[in-house]
Amino acid sequence: MNPNRQCPSQRAYDIIIVGGAIMGASTAWFLSKNKDFDGSVLVVERDPTYEHSSTMHTNSCMRQQFSTELNVRISQYAAEFVKNIRHFMDGDELVPELSIHNFGYMYFADNENFAKILRESQEVQIKAGAGTQILSPEHIKQKYPFYNVDDIVLGSINLVDEGYWDGTAVFDAWRRQSGKAGVEYIANEVVAMTKSADGRKVESVTLRSGEVIGCGAVLNASGPRAGRTAQMAGIHVPVEPRKRYSWIFAAEQPLDQDLPLTIDPSGVHVRENGGGTYQCGAHSDIDPAVDFDDFVMDLDIWENHVWPILATRIPQFEAIKVQSEWAGHYAYNTFDHNAIMGPHDEVINFFFLNGFSGHGLQQSPAMGRGTAEMLIYGEYRSLDLSPFNYRRIPDNLPIIEKAVI
């Protein structure tokens, strides 16, 4: 696979995937592994460095603490995949053995309404086989004495298959193996689409370099740019880029145990990063859509918002030093913050894999597998992901997921 190749080798492909980051790569790999599929696949990625992709700006964590059973099941498959990745990839010795650093997610509730949501969500998670525990403030203090829990009603944590994993290693393995199996990756950009006379199908895509490429199906896997990609086919999808800020900092007095990925009631979150360093994330109170190329840091948010919250919640973080910082984009689904999948209801060969609103990396194994099944068979065969299909949007049937960070 030559990641810098710009021109496709064919004039038409069975499937064109617009976007080669984690979702496009996952789908391409699952297509390449399916014995019932022998078609041609082209992955078009505008930036083969992935410098500004959501994939490269992620916390690279997974959790089972969702409020809907389907989202729990999706994360459980991700854990199975990561822990057994070399098996899934036929014993390829170039694929590293991976594990999950199970420091867990710690959700804090500072009021009875959110405490009720956490209790109800735990029931869903336990039913699905998760190991979520509800902790009183006293229990939290016993297990994690560094927290200030004076304002906390309860906490929720799961230490089984919940924490950090090496998303980049999985991403690289998917691209390498699928490329070796015949999936073609090019560094280019889809700038237009041509539909059939009846408007029911996309017949071709036009690349920035000028080529017009025929297609059997198009998959929109273009992350925060999903809305722009859909517009080329005359389709509206409620996905837009929202800016999210991250910091890596060192503590003068590091904690003497792992720090769970802690979700403060303010929305600020912080996790273990190793070696006395920690990773923190937040967004501004005013959270508008931003330009696709806007990655400018807000220089005031750390000093005036994030650091005071960290120092209050974890007093040992009073003395810390920022080592690096960056802004990335969520592919934010303004309809219901959940994945948008499946075919369009009118342009029947235009498929979605969009709108993950911050939990896409951990969902990529199940979503890539399911999308490959939908493209090949016209149905989901491993895990029924149909609740995420695009049709729910015109039908105004949002998925109510209460655990969106």
Image (cartoon, rainbow, N blue to C red):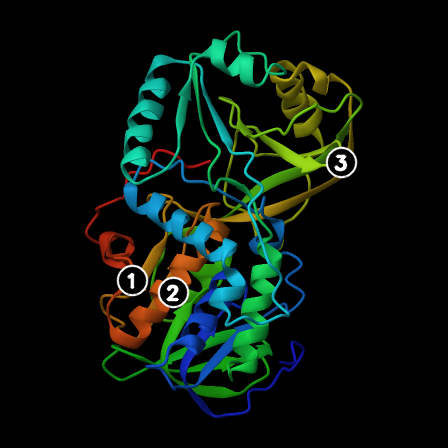
Task: Tell me the distance, in whole angstroms, between the alpha carbons under discs 1 and 3.
Answer: 39 Å
Assess disc 1: are there few (<14), some (14-19) or many (≥20) residues with their C-alpha within 10 Å of its C-alpha: few
- Could you say where residue 259 lies in the image, as x and y percent from the top left? 61, 28
Residue 131 located left or right of residue 96: left
- Could you say where residue 61 lies in the image, as x and y percent from the top left? 54, 44
- The residue depicted at 60 percent of the width and 31 percent of the height is 270
Mark closer to the chain start, 2 or 3: 3
Query: Which quadrant is home to the N terminus?
Result: bottom right
Residue at which label 3 appears: 275
Secondary structure at badge 2 equals: helix
Residue at which label 1 appears: 382
Point out which mark residue 369 bears: 2
- The residue depicted at 67 percent of the width and 78 percent of the height is 4
- Could you say where residue 230 lies in the image, as x and y percent from the top left? 39, 65
Q: Residue furthest toward the left?
A: 395
The disc labelled 3 sits on which kind of residue?
Gly
Secondary structure at badge 3 equals: loop
Label 2 with label 1: CB-CB less than 8 Å: yes
The disc labelled 1 sits on which kind of residue?
Ser
Task: Tell me the distance, in whole angstroms, between the alpha carbons under discs 2 and 3.
Answer: 35 Å
Of the residues tagged 2 and 3, which is closer to the observer? 3
